[in-house]
Image (tube, rainbow, N blue to C red):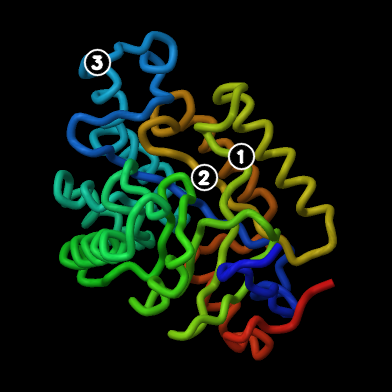
Amino acid sequence: MTGPWHGTAPAWSGWPGDRKLAVMITVMVELWSPGGWPPYAPMAAAWPLPGAPDHHSISWSRYGIDDGAWRLARILNSRCIPATFGVSGLVGEERPDLVRALHRDGHEIAAHSWTQDVVPALLDAEAEEANLTRCLDGIGSLTGHRPVGWMSPRAGFSDRTADLLARHAMTWWGDHNDRDLPSVLATDHGPLVRIMHSDVTDVRSTGGPAAYHRDHRDLLAVLLAEPGPGVLNVTVHAHVGGRPLPAAMFDRVLTEIQKAGDSVWIATHQQVAEHVLADPAADGNGGSARS
């Protein structure tokens, strides 16, 4: 596969302290444009209302900013686990207290488009840059730190996204699924670390909360048994996995991770990116390919 986004996996000896696995906890806090809702909302998927505003599905999608993100943050904070929160820019406008609280508690805030229905792949160059800067400026005004990481809704990036992110001093980009390990992409504006998107999440699992826990438990065991280094990206959406039962299963996943002790390094996306870039092989020109 070729393309402007295709980087080369850097050669490094391992994670800090020779740990086998880097574990990133990713919490998505999303909103749709006013009057919009996710098509996978339970009522919307089971019983669409063509031509009518689906107020129930709108309210379902807003659960994350009112209750879900707070519950997930409490779970993470109780375990002293730092997470990366992928936040829609509109969340900062509607719930600035939430964004400030997450930042205050030491979590990384990544930009996740203005809303879930503003997808870079569907935008022209001017609109894509305007969307990016609106997100970075809005979140930065609340936390005092512009985000340095980006995840597109639906991982739907454009051919311009990489250079645009690098030009705006972003460190990492979380839209990819072609490699297990992070890779470094050289751009005209400097290196950009590509970090894999999760294969298993609460919105793509068909087995419900119990399956979410089981799949992550089994995946953790598989990755720990493989030759290292490896990556486990645990993703949960505040409006789905932030509800009581899914959140309890998410908490059980964290228990499994912490039981692994010194075999795992729990890190934010930015910490992973900094570790990759600090390796001499990751020089911003792709580094050396891993076998």
Q: Earlier in the sequence, mark 1 or mark 3?
A: 3
Disc 2: CA contacts within 10 A as few (<14), some (14-19) or many (>=20): many
| 168, above or below 284, in the image | above
Q: Which residue is mark 1?
A: 200
Name the residue beneath numbered marker 2.
235
Question: Is 187 placed above or below 208 here?
Answer: below
The quadrant in which the C terminus is found is: bottom right
Q: Residue at the spot x=56%, y=70% of the render?
A: 4
Q: Secondary structure at mark 2?
A: strand
Q: Nearer the viewer, mark 3 or mark 2?
A: 3
Image coordinates for residue 183, horizontal then vertical, percent: 63, 71
Looking at the rendered structure, the secondary structure element under dot 3 is loop
Q: Are marks 1 and 2 in contact (CB under 8 Å)?
A: yes
* Residue at image location 41% in from the left, 66% down from the top: 149
Q: Residue at position x 20%, y 67% from top?
A: 137
Q: Earlier in the sequence, mark 3 or mark 2?
A: 3
